[in-house]
Image: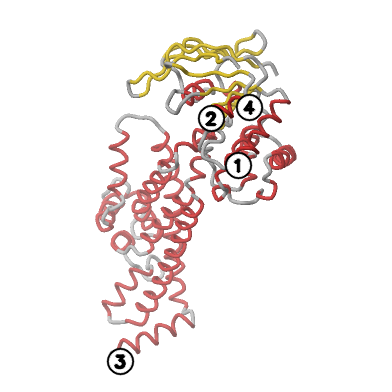
Amino acid sequence: MNLRLRISQIRKSHNGDRVLDDCSFFFEQGGVYVLTGPNGSGKSTLLRICALLERPDSGEIAYFLGQERLEDNIFLRRRVTLVLPQVGIFNTSVFNNISYGLRVRGAGRSEIEQKTAEMLAFSGLTQKRGQNAPSLSSGEKQRMGIARGLVIEPEMLFLDEPTASIDETNTRLIEEMILEKKKQGITMIITTHDRAQAERLADKLLMIRDKKLVSVPA
Amino acid sequence: MNNIAGSLSQAFSLILHLDQELLSIILLSLRVSGSALVVSIAIGLPLAAFMAFGKFPLKGIFVNILNTFMGLPPVVVGLLVYLFLSRSGPFGFLALLYTPSAMIIAQTILALPIVASLTHSAIVSVDPIIRQAAKTLGATPLQISLTVIREARYGIMSGIMAAFGRVMAEVGAILIVGGNIAGYTRVMTTTIALETDKGNFELALALGLILLAISLAINVALNVFRKKGTAEA
C-alpha cells in the first residue's frame, strides 16, 4: 500500500460563495491528517472533493501509487472511502451494512463472514449483528459507519466529523478505533471542529484559514 | 329488512359451501387482476427506475403525466381498449375482445400508472445520503441504483398493493372489454352488478363480502408495509 494524494489549487463555491480557494497539499502514505476549523469553514467540502464524492470548480485531484498516477475510475474509488457524518445507514441489519462494501466487490461468502465478523468485534457491535441498523444509537451508528468503511481495507480512509454529536464513551471508543488502525499504517484524513481531539489524533494538523488549506505546527 | 337478512344468510351459506360458480368467479378475478399486476410490475418498476435515475429533457412533465394517469377513469380505459381491439380497430385481427386477455390489458393500463408513479415517488423519497454512502463504499452506478431501490422497498410494495386493490375493485373497463360472459369473462365485480340488476342478491352479496375481505387483506398488508417502512426509517 503506497497510495498518495496530491491536491492542487482546489477552488470550490457553493451558491456563488467561495468556500475553498487555492488549496494545495500532498498527503503522503500512512499517518493521520486532521483537518480542523470552525463549522462552515469548508472542511467537509474539501474532504468530499478528496474522496472523489464532489468535483472542484477548478484545480486538480491526483492519486499516485508509487510514481504512477491513477485514473479516476471505479478501481481508484475502491481504494479509498469516506465515512459521512450522518453515516447513511441502510435499512437492513448491522451485518448487512458492514458487509456492503465486500458484497459490491463480489467477495465470497466465507470472506464476507470472516471480515465482517472481525469488524463487528473491532467496533464492539458483535452483539448487535442481527439488529436493524437504523435502530442503533447515534454512537453505535457512527462506529458501524467506520467499521463499514474499514471492512474493505481502504488504503485511504476519510472520516468527516466522526464524533460530532455523540457521547463521551462512544467518542473514546471511536478514537481508540482510529488509533488502532493508525498502527496498521492506513492513511486517515479526519475533519473535526474539536481542537483537543485534533491534537490527540493528528500526526499532521491542518486548518482551513481564509478559505486556504494551511499546516498548523504541532 | 327481512329480505336483506335472508339474502345475507344465503350469501354466507354460498361462501361456506364454496359454491362452484362462486369459486370459478373468484379464481378468474384473481387470475385477471393478478396477471395485470404482474405485467404492471414488469413494466412499471423499470419505468419508475428510469424516471428516477435517468436524466432526460422534460422529465418533470413526464412525471406529471404519469401521476395524472393514476386517476384514469376505468370506463374511458374500457372504451379505448374496446376501440383498439374491436374488429374494425387496429388490433382487431388478434380477436381479443370479450376474452380474459382483453380484461388483463384494460386492467394493466389502470394498474401501470399506479405502480410506476408510487414506485417513482418511493425511490425519489430515499435520503440522498444513501446514494452517497453506497458510492463511497465502492458501488458501481448500477449497484447504487439497486441499493436505492432496495431502500424504497416498503414504498414500492405499498404502490403494488394499492394497484392490486384498484384493479380488483374495478368494474367499468372489464365490463366493456370482457362482456361479462358467464363462465368465461365474468368476474366478481361484473357479477355483482349483473346479479343486483336481476334481483339475485345472494350471489351478489356473497361476492361483495369476499371482495370486502380481499380489500381488507390488501389494506392490512398496506399498513404493515407502511408501518415497517416508517419504523425502520
Among all residues in the image, which is located at the extreme top? Answer: A67
- State the residue in front, B144 or B90: B144
Q: Are marks 1 and 2 in contact (CB under 8 Å)?
A: no
SS at circle 4? helix
Per the image, the residue denoted by label 2 is: A194
What amino acid is at disc 3? Asn
What amino acid is at disc 1? Asn
What amino acid is at disc 4? Arg
- State the residue in front, A153 or B204: A153
- State the residue in front, A16 or B126: A16
Per the image, the residue denoted by label 3 is: B2
SS at circle 2? loop
Among all residues in the image, which is located at the extreme bottom? Answer: B2
What amino acid is at disc 2? Asp
Label 1 vs label 3, nearer the camera: 1
Per the image, the residue denoted by label 4 is: A200
Decide if residue A73 is on the left or right side of residue B186. right
* Chain of the residue under the numbered disc 4 shown in the image: A
SS at circle 1? helix
Q: Confirm whether circles 3 and 2 share one chain.
A: no
Q: Residue at x 62, y 46 (%)?
A: A94
Instruction: Estimate the spatial distance between the alpha carbons at disc 1 and disc 2, rounded to whole Å.
Output: 28 Å
Label 1 vs label 2, nearer the camera: 2
Q: Image quarter for residue B223? A: bottom left
For marks 1 and 2, the one nearer the N-term is: 1
Instruction: Estimate the spatial distance between the alpha carbons at disc 1 and disc 3, rounded to whole Å.
Output: 62 Å
Label 4 vs label 3, nearer the camera: 4
Per the image, the residue denoted by label 1 is: A97
* Chain of the residue under the numbered disc 1 shown in the image: A
